[in-house]
């Protein structure tokens, strides 16, 4: 398993080793020991989510406020998506910056999005099945978001019609959102 750091500290691209032959393939999709070694802290996933969406569906940019913050380990099991993480920790040297990675069932890449980051994805194929593990349960009272097209973030989603929920279209801009502090502990000891 290859784990690569990105331009945003804590956001990592994970590439499993795929062993294939004429019968198909085998791969380890998750190794806690390797992930924790790369991160430098413990992770305990407690919930896994899956969505199926059609081309042009954009979900995000989502996050949860403390004490319900979540890290996410994202992958695609059918189709292709552009997966995006945005640093929303006020005072961070990379505040407001984003990283975008294409995840697909062909490239088998995964994206680890740490606490303190907003997350979203755009479906690039006819359909996509997107799955992600989280290290804290969904808490509707802490659910927040940032509008996908905030010009201060400047995510290049690409061309074509975008399909968003009413909720995602009406999220606040980064400057108006409730965010994280860079110096707060987003990884309490368990």
Image: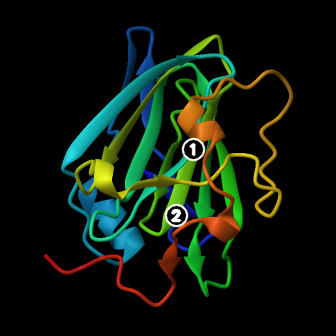
Q: Is residue 135 left or right of residue 159?
A: left
Regarding mark 1 in the picture, which secondary structure is present there?
Answer: strand
Return the x and y of residue 187 as percentages of the image width and height: 30, 76
Q: Residue at 22% of width from left, 44% of height from top?
A: 47
Q: Is residue 167 above or below residue 71?
A: above
Return the x and y of residue 154 as percentages of the image width and height: 81, 56
Q: Is residue 21 above or below residue 39?
A: above
Q: How many marks?
A: 2
Regarding mark 2 in the picture, which secondary structure is present there?
Answer: strand
Residue 7 appears in view: no
Return the x and y of residue 146 as percentages of the image width and height: 61, 54
Q: Is residue 152 left or right of residue 135?
A: right
> Residue 120 bears which disc, if any?
1
Distance in Å between CA atoms under marks 1 and 2: 10 Å
Q: Is residue 71 left or right of residue 171?
A: left
Residue 178 appears in view: yes
Q: Crowding at label 1, few (<14), some or many (≥20) Cα neighbours within 10 Å?
A: many
Label 2, on which residue?
Answer: 117
Front-lying residue, 124 or 149: 149
Image quarter in which the C terminus is found = bottom left
Return the x and y of residue 158 as percentages of the image width and height: 83, 34
């Amino acid at each position: 398993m290859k784990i690569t750091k990105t331009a945003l500290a804590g956001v990592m691209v994970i590439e499993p080793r795929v062993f294939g032959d004429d019968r198909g393939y085998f791969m380890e999709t998750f190794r806690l020991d390797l992930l924790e070694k790369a991160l430098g802290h413990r992770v305990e996933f407690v919930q896994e989510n899956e969505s199926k969406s059609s081309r042009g569906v954009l979900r995000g940019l989502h996050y949860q406020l403390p004490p319900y913050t979540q890290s996410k380990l994202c992958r695609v099991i059918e189709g292709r998506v552009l997966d995006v993480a945005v640093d929303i920790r006020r005072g961070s040297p990379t505040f407001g910056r984003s990283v975008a990675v294409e995840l697909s069932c062909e490239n088998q890449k995964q994206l680890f999005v740490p606490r303190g980051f907003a997350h979203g994805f755009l479906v690039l194929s006819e359909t996509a099945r997107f799955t992600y593990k989280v290290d804290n349960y969904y808490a509707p009272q802490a659910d927040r978001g940032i509008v996908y097209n905030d010009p201060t973030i400047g995510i290049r989603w690409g061309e074509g019609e975008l399909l968003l929920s009413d909720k995602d279209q009406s999220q606040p801009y980064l400057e108006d959102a409730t965010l994280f502090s860079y110096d707060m502990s987003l990884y309490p000891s368990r």
